[in-house]
Image: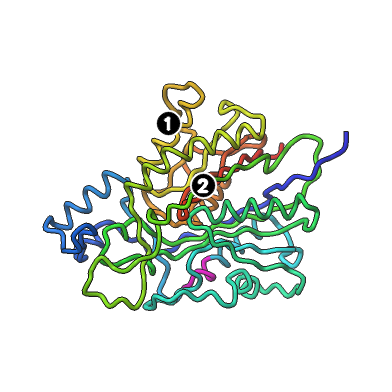
Amino acid sequence: MSNTIYTVIIGTGSYVPNRVIKNDFFLDAEFYDPATNQKFEIPNSEIIRKFFEITNIEERRYADDDQVTSDLAALAAKDAIASSGIDPESLEFILVAHNFGDMNHGLVQPDLCPSLANRVKTKLGITNPSVLTNDIISGCPGWTTAMITANAFIKSGIFKRGMVIGADVLSRVADPYDRDRMIFSDGAGAAIVEAVESLVPIGILSHACRSDNDHGMLNMGFSVNHDCPKTHMHLKMLGSKVYVYALSTVPGVVKESLEKAGLHLDDVSKVLIHQANEKMDEAILSRVFKLYGKADYDKNVMPMTIQHFGNSSTATVPTLLDLVLKDKMEDHQISKGDTIILTSVGAGMTINSIVYKVPE
């Protein structure tokens, strides 16, 4: 029996911005009802209370005014390089998943040229001209999409080592008059991946994907305050529709990824799921368990960061992975030999689920 090439994570890193934005930050905000485009008559304290009950978000992180997305990405990348112990010049590709490029504070204009991957390479001081730098735009599942892309690179034999980063600064693209702005946050996470030959399956074992052509659930649109000039658009979300879509589709994609790996849910130690709404994630996991005939789910399977970090889009899953691997989340560990799931749902709509086995 000959060895097979697998994609293995050899180091992770993350950057969580220093600015803590608690819910009471929004007490003085002007929130408009998206249904009527008029100011809500109920006080902001009530809007915030209901928001917390639904999402369990009590605070989130914002980038400093002098930081842009590629800055956060580079900081997470440096952390991943340090944890892996590699020479950054040995990287053969850098993939950066994001959604809006480098948006400067005070401006609502995406800056996508040059690519963020190229900017990160520069900020890391990498001089190797052969490094492939490429950006991935795929909504909240951007990092998992980039990991699937990296796996294809490595399995093909073209590359042996690369870095996959997820970074976003959503605080600068959210509509200041929309209560949904309270969901969004900023951050970055990164992983170093490498080709490893093995007789037994390790690393990325399988993946499953789904995309649907319903762009009305999460897209770009004008402010809910119609007095705002229509000079730029903001990130818009129909939360209730996203909730229903996620519950009806994500569990099946997770199950499909396990079936492709020839595994059962009982083989899984952790499910690292995109964090946008704690109740939604709990309902998704409950439905995954029901697909395997289980009445309820084990809460210890799903670590949560949303209470303090909010929804940092492409940064969420790699940040969560880094924190758990480095024992920075109480009561949650990932050990050698564990099988985990990395899954995300978001704009598009798009869903990815990756089955990953930590090498012994």
Residues packed near mark 2 inside 10 Å, few (<14), some (14 to 19) or many (20 plus) = many
**Magenta stretch in the rendered image:** 67-72
Q: Which mark is residue 255?
A: none
User: Where 147 sits versus 38, above or below?
Assistant: above
Separation (CA) of disc 1 from disc 2: 17 Å
Q: Does the stretch in magenta take in 70?
A: yes
Q: Secondary structure at mark 2?
A: strand
Residue 327 visible in the picture? no
Helix, strand or loop at mark 1: helix
| Residue furthest to the front | 213
- Magenta stretch: dominant secondary structure: helix
| Marks 1 and 2 close (CB-CB < 8 Å) | no
| Residue 360 placement: quadrant | top right
Which residue sits furthest left?
Answer: 41
Q: Tell me what residue is drawn at x 50 percent, y 69 percent.
A: 69
Q: Amino acid at mark 2?
A: Ile
> Can residue 188 be seen at all in this image of the molecule?
yes
- Name the residue beneath numbered marker 1: 286
Residue 136 % position (x, y): 58, 62
Q: Earlier in the sequence, mark 1 or mark 2?
A: 1
Does the segment drawn in magenta span residue 287? Answer: no
